[in-house]
Image (tube, rainbow, N blue to C red):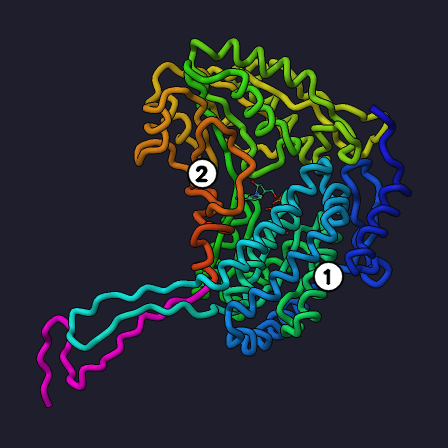
Amino acid sequence: MTALPTAEDLSRSAREAAARCGVDLDAVAGDHPVTSPVNGARLASVRWQGAADVQDAVTRAGQAFQAWRTVPAPVRGGLVRRFGELLREHKADLGTLVSLEVGKITSEARGEVQEMIDICEFAVGLSRQLYGKTISSERPGHRLMETWHPLGVVGVISAFNFPVAVWSWNTAIALVCGDPVVWKPSELAPLSALASAALLDRAITETGAPADLSQVVLGGADVGEALVDSPGVALLSATGSTRMGRAVGPRVAERFGRSLLELGGNNAAIVTPSADLDLTTRGVVFAAAGTAGQRCTTMRRVIAHVDVVDELTDRLAAAYRRLPIGSPTEEGTLVGPLVHDASFKAMQDALEAARQQGGEVVVGGERRLADEAPDAYYVEPAIVRMPGQTDIVRQETFAPILYVLPYRTLEEAIALNNDVPQGLSSSIFTSDQAEAERFLAADGSDCGIANVNIGTSGAEIGGAFGGEKQTGGGRESGSDAWRSYMRRATNTINYSGELPLAQGVKFTV
Ligand code: NAD
């Protein structure tokens, strides 16, 4: 492990990467410090905005909507195509900003930008496939059809751990659907947000689209709340903790707005006696320790059959002891830092609670590099054997703690998988097809994502992404998630020259 980069190194790389994407950090400087979890030092400072700025942005976006909604969808796709090209050109720059602001290792940070590119490609294809249905009418000489129209301004609130990809999932789809976007990014990652938005602005200018289609408002929860309460926001798409969703959902509902909530997870893998333990070990370690346990889909529980639980735990512990932990910008690192001190404290509190609830910490949990970087929080990912699914296991602690629970019957394992408040991702490791099918069936996993022989994290953009229960029920990204960004009109067309009424009703005047 080489030394951590200096504050000057990090701030220079952030400034250069932002400039290449079109952001002059001097022009956006203000009172709010942006610190890097890599070494705890200040990267830059930015100006925060307020509720009035949100209202201005929503008003301008509403005006852009008037024009954009009449542009044919395949032409709207041209803007997203250009945006995707610019993202491809600046993949390394955006990846650098993501690494520096939220501590992702380089390959994961670039992978996040790759997701942005992928969703642009998906959205360009989609721009020619916003299909409605033609439906048989019960009346002669009539046709029934449904038409999908642009919905209006989309407000996006995003979390720190996918600081740019989540915005792009929403934005690429919203733009081809005919909707402008106003974005309130995580307060921890304003530079990545400004750089992403600058690339989209460039694509907007080059393709002659309305200037206010994309806007960013920087700030804290109060800025998010202003977006939530704005009647000009037709769809509020919010990604973050269940605590945030619980505040946001009812407020949007109160004004009869639409919300799309992508909230916390508490994701498990069931490991059956027939599982390939080599593959399982690799799958679990990536899903549980990757991104330092800070993905919504991070694996937080392994539910292993009593015949394999000891061997699996030994293999996992051995792999955990070999994990390279350190600066995310250094080649070879697999585990970067936690995002801030509160995450470290939450992890330590959870480990203590787990011990009190009968758990045994098998490996990890200790802080690393505290002397070199006292304001950065590197930790050894932890594995904790638990006697059962106690209170602490049922909570999402946003840090790398993997709880291991034993089971005897598959019914018991599925019940444990489902017996948490969250319902995002899940998987089963098995070589028995019947077990896999049982897990995927209606009375199997209750999560929005259910996988076989692969971990809980690392979804592709082609499928709809999201989960049930306290995860919020929203779906973003691929499949038919685009429907949330449009309004549906049902049309009845009468070409009969007569006026037969539905349900045989007679009403002759
Ligand atoms: P967070 O809830 O602290 O913040 C998320 C965003 O919500 C931030 O932009 C924040 O400013 C804003 N916010 C907070 N309170 C608000 C309020 N009352 N009104 C409006 N906006 C408000 O979450 P975080 O720490 O940034 O991210 C981690 C959490 O996000 C985890 O729980 C993780 O599981 C979840 N997450 C979920 C998904 C998903 O797709 N399901 C994806 C990524 C992260």
Q: Judge by depth and name the residue closer to the eye, 208 or 194.
A: 208
Q: Position of residue 43 (x, y in %)?
A: 83, 47
Q: Quadrant of residue 47?
A: bottom right
Vertical comparison of 292 with 154: above or below: above
Check disc 2 and report its element: helix, strand or loop: strand
Query: 449 above or below 439?
Result: below
Lateral position of residue 3 relative to residue 188, left or right: right
**SS class of the residue under badge 1?**
helix
Asked if residue 505 lies in the magenta stretch, the reply is yes
Q: Which residue is mark 1?
A: 198
Mark 1 CB within 8 Å of ligand 1: no
| Quadrant including the N terminus | top right
Image check: 138 left or right of 77? left
Q: Position of residue 175 (x, y in %)?
A: 56, 64
Residue depicted at x 32% and y 24%: 434
- Under mark 2, the amino acid is Ile
Question: Would residue 257 be counted in the magenta stretch?
Answer: no
Residue 193 image offset from top left, x and y in percent:
70, 54
Q: Is residue 197 left or right of residue 474?
A: right
Label 2 belongs to which residue?
449
Residue at (47% x, 69% y) in the render:
150
Which mark is on residue 174? none
Report crowding for label 1: few under 14, some 14 to 19, many 20 or more residues within 10 A (C-alpha).
many
Q: Quadrant of residue 160?
A: top right
Q: Quadrant of the C terminus?
A: bottom left
Is mark 1 in CB contact (under 8 Å) with mark 2? no
Whichever of labels 1 and 2 marks the residue nearer the N terminus, that label is: 1
Tag 2: Cα neighbours inside 10 Å, few (<14), some, or many (≥20)? Answer: many
Q: Residue at x 81, y 34 (%)?
A: 375
- Which amino acid, mark 1? Ala
Q: Which residues are magenta?
A: 486-509
